[in-house]
Amino acid sequence: MSTENFEDGPQETLEERILGGLDAEQREVATTLTGPLCVLAGAGTGKTRAITHRIAYGVHSGVYSPQRLLAVTFTARAAAEMRSRLRDLGVGNVQARTFHAAALRQLQFFWPQAVGGALPQLLDHKASIIAEAARRLRLSTDRASIRDLASEIEWAKVSMLTPANYLEKAQGRGTPGGFDLTAVARVFQSYEDVKTDRNVIDFEDVLLITVGILQEDPKVAATVREQYRHFVVDEYQDVSPLQQRLLELWLGGRDELCVVGDASQTIYSFTGASPRHLLEFKARYPDAGMVKLIRDYRSTPQVVKLANELLAARRSSGPVADAAWAAPLQLVAQRPHGPSPQFTECTDDEAEAATVAKKVQGLLDAGTKASEIAVLFRTNGQSEAYEQALAASGIGYQLRGGERFFARKEVRDSILQLRAATRALTPGEVPDPLGQMVRDILASLGYTDSAPHSGGAVRERWESLAALVALADELAQVRGADFSLSDFVNELQERSLAQHAPTVQGVTLASLHAAKGLEWDAVFLVGLSEGLMPISFADSPESVDEERRLLYVGITRAREHLFMSWSTARTPGGRANRKPSRFLDGLRPDSVTGGTARSLGRAPKRKAAAPAMCRVCGTMLSSGAERKVGRCNQCPPSYEEQSFEALREWRKAQALEADVPAFVVFTDATLTAIAEAKPKSLEELSALAGIGPSKLEKYGEEVLRIMAESSVL
């Protein structure tokens, strides 16, 4: 679409063409072109639309020079989508990149003059270098520990830590990869040494070195600041300290900055992301404008209501966690009413997967496209059961995070065929419509207008080709009749570099983290039981809050249909000891009796279970151990030392006699709960968490005897 299309006619026409479809708040964003601006944008509120129209309006009205504006986001896919929208608005020469891509471009340009020589090779994966670093230290590693060490080193570097100060700053981060923090610091240093020996840099180095050059070379900094006068940063809640420092150096004390984010969608804290920069924006820029986008155009009122209630149900978790929790935006649904979210309890994981497959088939039969359905889970390890259940039902699916679309052989072959076809076009010849040309060219690779009846590889191949045809139709409609086959091939090449894949006709299977930024007509949130949501290793109030935000992100991916399910046992016939996620308390209806799966969609709501609170300071208890004891970890224990030690000695003797680990008798948390509660009867003892009927019968009298004897010593 040409710029002239937007500049024809009087100023009112320009405003109407660019701003006409925006709501009042989006329009305020789009017309606030100078000075600092903070946009708090809830899920589905059209933030990308608002900021791309802001850029387009600024360029077309002459306030911005397109070459001097840099739009930054966090994924290559999001950057590619932003560039595509900007092209559609007639400003395709605006730079829209990720932090890493923008920094790498600058580093490649300035390295020869700032450092000299050739830029070191960029490291695609850390695994081999970390393995070598560990071997130099004579440390034994496996794939899992190497992965954990890589994540820890990435966190350290984006937090602007070095091997020298890592140990001091990383206290409380556990044992990454099974190593104590001293060992991790040594691996960190060894990793840096191996990289130096091999003359390679990693992705974090790209940011670190760019920051170093901008800090130390005034000429380079002045050149960059002359090049870019205006900045837009999307997903600002995910900025790391290192990215924030780079942004500050780009700005150089100026305030021509627009940031967009939602603290309630902060789900990458484990990578170093922090909403602090978003929440403190007004403090850094007192004169900054502030706009809240709360009109949700994505989801039905039923979905929006559930999302709002999930965040509102959060209770105080102590001063540290409360300070990090931002007051959520109260979304207001703009779509017509839809079906109520469904809650389903199943007997085991296999039954849950089968139930989901059956419901998916029902949606397909009712006309929902497979590409508009997603099954989202907390961990990637949960996907296998749903892959099997969908395959057994003959339902195609795509695993997000599996083989990349543009890496598939049929896609690479298609691009080669399309490029060859552009060379074969006769000059002056009137070509067929783009969609028809692409169909004809891909027919030689197996494309047909109707899907094959078979599944497996044949169906997957057809779905890839069909996605390319659909993209051609879509772009031809958006870009107009002048959009040629050559333009389409160039678009595919750019999307390939950005991994901006078109939509494939298949049910999406993805983790909740991988689903960020995406949306579907129907979403299944599965495995919503304690231990998976929140995940078992979320052992602090802050990490439990992040799990709540992760579920919020999952809920807000759904446009119309939302299904939430969990199972009471892991395997068929297994012990039914799982409980629904605490986050569903007050949201899900009362359970009802049933067979393999119990659909709870229309049952009356039950009263929300009150959150467990510390009996000493009154803050919410987050971990299972805290709930057993009834006291948070920050408050001191209130038991008598002799009682607790007597219980420990008794437990040790019981464990030795039964030849089992001590925790099998009672966990430390349960012993602490007993010692602090000082039960005097079996009834009082049975009220404590961790003491079921079998343990009460087996150990109850002995425990009461020990408590009675030790309390009078």
Image (cartoon, rainbow, N blue to C red):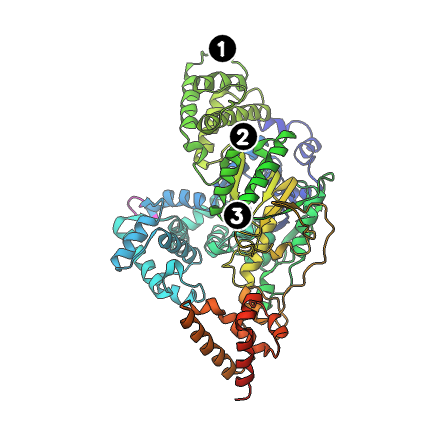
Marks 2 and 1, how far apart in space? Answer: 34 Å
Q: Main secondary structure of the magenta part?
A: loop
Name the residue that disc number 1 marks: 429
Q: For the residue labelled by badge 1, is the local secondary structure a helix, a strand or a loop? A: loop
**Residue sitting at x 43%, y 36%:** 403
Name the residue that disc number 2 marks: 505
Instruction: Pinpoint residue 344: horizontal percent, then vertical percent.
Output: 63, 46
Q: Is residue 234 visible?
A: yes
Callout 1 amino acid: Glu
Pick whichever of labels 1 and 3 is earlier in the sequence.
1
Instruction: Pinpoint residue 104: horizontal percent, then vertical percent.
Output: 40, 44
**Residue sitting at x 65%, y 30%:** 366
**Residue sitting at x 52%, y 51%:** 570
The quarter of the rendered structure image containing the N terminus is top right
Depth check: give the residue in front, 207 or 587: 587
Judged left or right of residue 706, residue 659 is left
Is 409 contained in the magenta span? Answer: no
Depth check: give the residue in front, 442 or 13: 442
Query: Which stretch did the figure color magenta?
Result: 114-120
* Number of residues whose C-alpha sits closer than 10 Å to that of mark 2, classed few (under 14), some (14–19) or many (20 or more): many
Q: For the residue labelled by badge 3, is the local secondary structure a helix, a strand or a loop? A: loop
Judged left or right of residue 343, residue 404 is left
